[in-house]
Structure formats: structure tokens, C-alpha cells
Image (cartoon, rainbow, N blue to C red):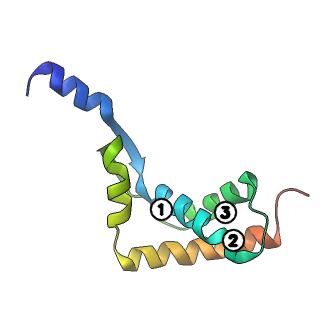
Amino acid sequence: MDIERQRAVCEELVLVNIVEELVKDRVNALIGDFDMCSCRICRMNACALALNELPPKYVTTTRGVLFALVSVKGDAYQTAVDVEVAKALEKVKDHPLHD
């Protein structure tokens, strides 16, 4: 690989915790089912709570491939994410950090 091509690939690479991306996606998808505030504060608090219960999975990838990586995760792992997101949404619903 020539130097210019290698430099371009390196500039496109990002370090991503794909669990974080999965959790954000699931919080946004499920929050409407919980009859609760859906402001940014509540969404972010739910994400933080869920992420603290799940092991991180870091990958290096190009920006365009990130969506594909997130969608490839297995059903068993997706279930674990959904369980932790549901628990987090319940906690935030019961104890929002705003009026």
C-alpha cells in the first residue's frame, strides 16, 4: 500500500465502543414504550446506566462501516443490551434528574 493510501485509511479510522452505539440506538427505540420523559438528559442518563452494566466492545473501523458492525451483533447479545436498557429506562423514569 502506498503512503498516501495508508494515510487516507488511517484518517478514516475511528475507535468505537460498539456497545455504546447499540445502547444509544435501543434507548431511542424503546423510550417511547415507557411513558416517560424523552429529553436528552433522560436519554443520556439511561444510556449511562445501561453502559455501566455491559462490557465494552471496542473496534477500529472506518466511519462508513460502523453501521454494519452495529447491526451484525448476535441475538443473544442484543437481548442482553435490551434487558439493561429496559432496566435503565425504568430507573430514569422513576427518578429523573430534572423537574
**Residue found 26% across the figure and 30% down from its top:** 10
- Proximity of marks 1 and 2: CB atoms separated by less than 8 Å: no
The quadrant of the image that shows the N terminus is top left
Mark 3 surroundings: few (<14), some (14-19) or many (≥20) residues within 10 A: many
The type of residue carrying mark 2 is Gly
Distance (Cα) linking label 1 and label 3: 13 Å
Name the mark on residue 46.
3
User: In this picture, is 10 found above or below 52?
Assistant: above
Residue 4 point in image, percent of width and height: 17, 19
Measured from the top left, where is residue 47 in percent x and y? 61, 60
Residue type marked 1: Leu
Q: In the image, 40: left or right of 57?
A: right
* Mark 1 → mark 2, Cα distance in angstroms: 17 Å
Q: Which residue is mark 1?
A: 22
Q: Which mark is residue 32?
A: 2
* For discs 3 and 2, the disc positioned in front in the rendered view: 2
Q: Quadrant of residue 32?
A: bottom right
Residue 61 vertical position relative to residue 89 in the rendered view, above or below: above
At 78% from the left and 70% from the top, the residue drawn is 36
Task: Give the quarter of the figure containing the C terminus.
Answer: bottom right
Residue 51 appears at what percent x and percent y? 55, 61
What residue is drawn where x is 38% and y is 54%?
Answer: 67
Q: Earlier in the sequence, mark 1 or mark 3?
A: 1
Work out whether 35 lies above or below 46: below
Q: Secondary structure at mark 1?
A: helix
Q: Earlier in the sequence, mark 1 or mark 2?
A: 1
**Residue furthest out toward the right:** 99
Q: Residues within 10 Å of mark 1 (few under 14, many from 20)?
A: many
Q: Residue visible at 53% across and 61% down?
A: 25
Front disc: 1 or 2 = 2
Instruction: Find numbered disc 2 in the image and state the secondary structure of the residue it sits on.
Output: helix
